[in-house]
Amino acid sequence: MEQSRAHGKSHWYHETQARNQAADVLPLVPEAAHVADRFLLDLTLPPFSSQTLRWLELSRQISAHLFPDAVDVNRLNTFSAYERLSTALTVAQVFGVQRLCNHYAARLAPLPGPDSSRESNHRLAQITQYARQLAASPSIICTQSRQQLDAVGLTAPDMVLITQIVGFIGYQARVVAAGQALMGLPVRWLPGMPMQDDAPASCFDSPKGSWQPGLACREATQIDAISNEIPQALAALLAWDESLPDLLAELIQSLEVDQPLATLVALLNARINGSTSCFQLNGADELLKAATLTGERALKLWQPEDLLSHAVIQAVQLIIRAPDRFSAAQFSPLTVQGLSVEQAFTLLAWSGVCGWINRLKIGLGEVLPDA
């Protein structure tokens, strides 16, 4: 599949997004499909400790699990290899990290697409719309979004899978963007999507509640091994995939980040992406009580005294909203204020994981007020 850049637009389209108008065809980068490292996409990083190498290896395992070379579909798992890579390309285009766009476009190009029936076209269009919305504006995803996927034939395992793909590509985009900034490389070579808008403050006005799955959970699943890292209600839903939840939990556990900074990064992600459940879970009221306010207004007005927190806020806000614009100008202040290169890189990777969890909770369920 060839990408085209439509006149008057600032980002790439693949066929499910193309307009019927003149466009200059951009050549694929066929070698991008044959990288040795399908997570970092052959990005060369400095030597790191065994702890960092561990979470990078787990990320590679998750990538291989989500995007195998061949996929067997059945009645319960209908998401094909083409649909997986098409979804990955859509999300990569939203985040604008060129290395990801090249890789997933090159892997998608030789695959046979769906048949030309109206039903297949409608299904792919709905998948593409959901992926783009969850990536670019997660707070607009709601029960109706899941119903629209159900209407085009996606099963509960399919919906969990597509949401995992969107979350993972968002995480991968931020790790690659951070790695390229670390090495002083440009992240984007062409103009990308507009910067992501913050979720509206009204998302955080509701009383505190509990997150509940919006899909059927798998019966008789064993989730004890992952319940410490992933909330039990979410783990029961993710268990439609028998391997991925354990890998995700181990990834979370392996990302060792200073706790106050980890909490701050989680709160920034939850606020910008609109995940009220994650916002409450990370104790927003307790962390921000110095502002004499609570919730959304506190996070907006809170001004930490230390320069490191200021540098973290500036860097994390940009990598959440526009990873394609992240550069050494945002990475360097983290090291100037006391973090090592490895700590700064891991902190930005943690931001990607927080965004992944935000999208899982937004895409797969909703917060219901406590009785």
Image (cartoon, rainbow, N blue to C red):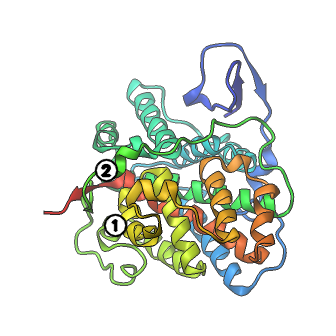
User: Is residue 212 visible to us here?
Assistant: yes
> How far apart, in angstroms, are the residues tagged by discs 2 and 1?
23 Å
SS under mark 1: helix
Q: Quadrant of the N terminus?
A: top right
At x 46% / y 31%, what residue is drawn?
A: 125
Amino acid at circle 1 = Leu
Measured as percent of width and height from the top left, residue 257 is found at: 60, 78
The residue beneath circle 1 is: 234
Measured as percent of width and height from the top left, residue 233 is found at: 29, 69
**Of residues 264 and 138, which is closer to you in this image?**
264
Measured as percent of width and height from the top left, residue 166 is found at: 51, 51
At x 35% / y 44%, what residue is drawn?
A: 202
Q: Residue furthest top?
A: 21
At x 77% / y 62%, what residue is drawn?
A: 331
Whether residue 38 sits left or right of residue 207 in the image: it is right
Q: In which image quadrant can residue 348 be found?
A: bottom right
At x 66% / y 72%, what residue is drawn?
A: 306
The residue beneath circle 2 is: 205
Q: Is residue 154 above or below residue 281?
A: above
Amino acid at circle 2 = Asp
